[in-house]
Amino acid sequence: MSGHSKWSTIKRKKAANDAKRGALFTRLAREIALAAREGGGDSETNFALRLSIERAKTNNMPKGNIERAINRGTGKDKQGTKLEKIMYEGYAPHGVALMIEVVTDNRNRSVADIRHVLTRLGGNMADAGAVSWQFRRAAYFAFPTENYDQEEIFELAVEAGADDITLGDEDIEIIAPVEAFKEVNDELQRAGIRLDEAALRMLPNTVIQLPPDQAIKVMRLIEDLEDLTDVQQVFSNIDITEEAVSLLEAA
């Protein structure tokens, strides 16, 4: 398994066992509310909402929380505040490019929190467009290898439209064009595969390789950004090695 994949797996497990589950539920509720606002409250016809609900269930979010988030998005909950999704751009130390996805009800707070983390750890904000050209949007899926027949998974994913499949010892990762997201997701679900992650990601066109000690500083900055309640995901163009992940775990 690549270092990046191993790090993603560690972070997913950390989120699942995080004592700050309230912050995680807040983040998931905002995602659900935004999806419901943009596409309606019916998960059968609103694929983005269905995906957000599945992610919430994977993280053991109570059914009542999910329903309240949907009502907030559709306007049934009149007390709900307006949410917006924003993609901020920035740099970590050593020139590593960052795309920071935010769902917030207060963009001034979000910007201040992000800038504080970046400044404290040697990064900086960037103007719109300064970083985004280095990334492309793609569909991303990940799940444990377990006892799945890897050859069957490979064929299923390719037939559904995937263009990159990584068959690791612990995880299987699938990357597909955005337009193939639903087809790949549905095929995996029909095959009885329980996904750890199914989302749209910003993938780097090229990656930056750093010595492990420098990579760790960047990884810590990314983790601190992801700990912010308003931040949904952070994408970067750093090449994560298994050595860097092992050093981070040992630190």
Image (cartoon, rainbow, N blue to C red):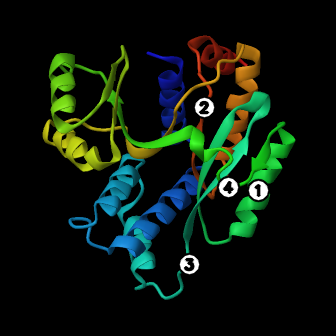
Disc 2 packing (10 Å; few <14; some 14–19; many ≥20) = many
Q: What residue is at 36 percent from the left and 16 percent from the top?
A: 168
Instruction: Where is residue 128? Give x, y as percent.
Output: 67, 55
Decide if residue 251 is on the left or right side of residue 160. Answer: right
Report which residue position mark 4 lands on: 128
Q: Quadrant of the C terminus?
A: top right
Residue extending farthest to the bottom is 78
Report which residue position mark 2 lands on: 237
Report which residue position mark 1 lands on: 113
Secondary element at image label 3? loop
Amino acid found under the numbered disc labelled 1: Asp
Decide if residue 186 is on the left or right side of residue 104. Answer: left
* Residue 220 location, quadrant: top right
Sequence-earlier tag: 1 or 4: 1
Q: Evaluate whether residue 19 shows in this view.
A: no
Amino acid found under the numbered disc labelled 2: Asn
Foreground disc of the pair 2, 3 = 2
Marks 4 and 3 sit apart, C-alpha to C-alpha, by: 23 Å
Report which residue position mark 3 lands on: 82
Sequence-earlier tag: 4 or 2: 4
Please tell me which residue lies in front, 167 or 251.
Answer: 167
Foreground disc of the pair 4, 3 = 4
* Residue 33 location, quadrant: bottom left
Q: Evaluate whether residue 84 shows in this view.
A: yes
For residue 197, above or below residue 220: below
Instruction: Where is residue 133? Give x, y as percent.
Output: 58, 43
Amino acid found under the numbered disc labelled 3: Lys
For residue 115, above or below residue 140: below
Marks 2 and 3 sit apart, C-alpha to C-alpha, by: 32 Å
Instruction: Where is residue 64? Give x, y as percent.
Output: 38, 68
Sequence-earlier tag: 2 or 1: 1
Disc 4 packing (10 Å; few <14; some 14–19; many ≥20) = few
